[in-house]
Image (cartoon, helix red, strand yellow):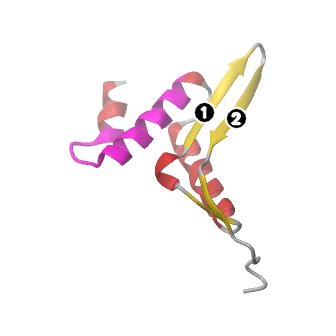
Amino acid sequence: MLGILQKLFGREGTKKTAKERLQIVLIHDRSDISPGLMEELRKDMIEVLSKYMEIDTDNIEMELDKANKSVAFVANIPVVRIKRKSQSEQ
């Protein structure tokens, strides 16, 4: 486990990056999804949502909650503003 943490956090990095990586590690510990897959999911969600709204990427929170035999994906993504025109109209 220590090797994974060292690989994820490295010796240098910003507070934001460390927080994001710690969230990914915690999500991984609570689920069967690898940290790499969670990071891909996060990036894909940001890309899709950014087409329709401006989001605060510094304060995104994602987690998987397990209850009985089901898993819920919970995301808190702060929206700065909604884009009124679709990309095809621009």
- Neighbourhood count class around disc 1 (C-alpha, 10 Å): few under 14, some 14–19, many 20 upward: some
In whole angstroms, how far apart are the C-alphas of marks 1 and 2? 6 Å
Looking at the rendered structure, the secondary structure element under dot 2 is strand
Res 54 → quadrant: bottom right
14 to the left or right of 64: left
Residue farthest to the bottom, as pictured: 90
Q: Are marks 1 and 2 in contact (CB under 8 Å)?
A: yes
Q: Quadrant of the C terminus?
A: bottom right
**Three-letter amino acid code of the residue under disc 1:** Glu
Q: Residue at x 54, y 46 (%)?
A: 60
Q: Is residue 12 magenta?
A: yes
Mark before the other along the chain sequence, 1 or 2: 1
Q: Relative to 22, does residue 50 appear above or below in the rendering?
A: below
Classify residue 80 by image quadrant: bottom right
Dot 1: what SS? strand
The residue singled out by tag 2 in the image is 73
- Per the image, the residue denoted by label 1 is 63
Q: Position of residue 25 (x, y in %)?
A: 46, 32
Residue 11 placement (x, y as % from top left): 21, 42
Tell me if mark 2 has few (under 14), some (14-19) or many (20+) residues whose alpha carbon lies within 10 angstroms of its own: few
Q: Which residues are magenta?
A: 7-29
Horizontal and vertical percent for residue 18?
Answer: 35, 41
The structure residue drawn at horizontal position 67% and vertical position 35%, both measured from the top left corner, is 74
